Amino acid sequence: MKIKPNSMLEYVTPDEIAECWDGVSESLQAKLWATVEEAHADRADVDIEECGPGDVVGLSSVVSVWGRFTDEEKLEINSLVNANTIF
C-alpha cells in the first residue's frame, strides 16, 4: 500500500508531533524522536547557513522523512493531522 503524507505535514516536524500533538501513541512518539536523530545524522554535512528558511523546514519536515515510517505509523500520523490541525 502506498500511503501519501497529508500535505500539512510539509510544515510540521517529527518532534513537534511527538511533543505537542494529542493522541500520539508511545510507540509512534519513540519512532518520531528516533527519526529526528536519524535525520540530523543524515544531514550532518548540510551547511544550514547556506540554506534559506524554506530549505531548513524541508530538511526537517515529516514529509522529508516519510519513508522511514511503517504503513501503520503513516496511517496514525495522517489521522493525527485531522485531530491536531492548528493551521
Image: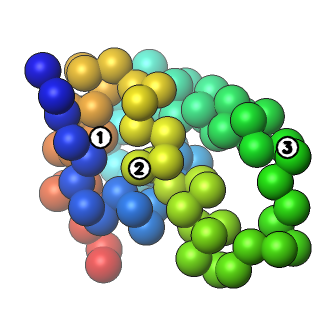
Task: Check disc 1: other Cα within 10 Å, few if <14, some if 14-19, many if 20+.
Answer: many
Q: Which residue is mark 3?
A: 44
N-terminal-most mark, 2 or 1: 2
Question: 39 or 23: nearer the eye?
Answer: 39
Gap between marks 2 and 1, in whole Å? 11 Å
Eyeballing the image, is 9 above or below 35?
below
Q: Which residue is mark 2?
A: 63
Camera sees residue 80: no
Gap between marks 2 and 3, in whole Å? 19 Å
Q: Secondary structure at mark 2?
A: helix
Eyeballing the image, is 61 above or below 72?
below
Name which residue type carries label 1. Answer: Ile
In contact (CB < 8 Å): disc 2 and disc 1: no
User: Residue 43 appears at what percent x and percent y?
Assistant: 76, 44
Mark 1 vs mark 3: give the one in front. 3
In contact (CB < 8 Å): disc 1 and disc 3: no
Q: Quadrant of the C terminus?
A: bottom left
Q: Residue at x 43, y 67 (%)?
A: 11
Q: Which residue is mark 1?
A: 77
N-terminal-most mark, 2 or 3: 3
Name which residue type carries label 2. Answer: Val
Mark 2 vs mark 1: give the one in front. 2
Name which residue type carries label 3. Answer: Ala
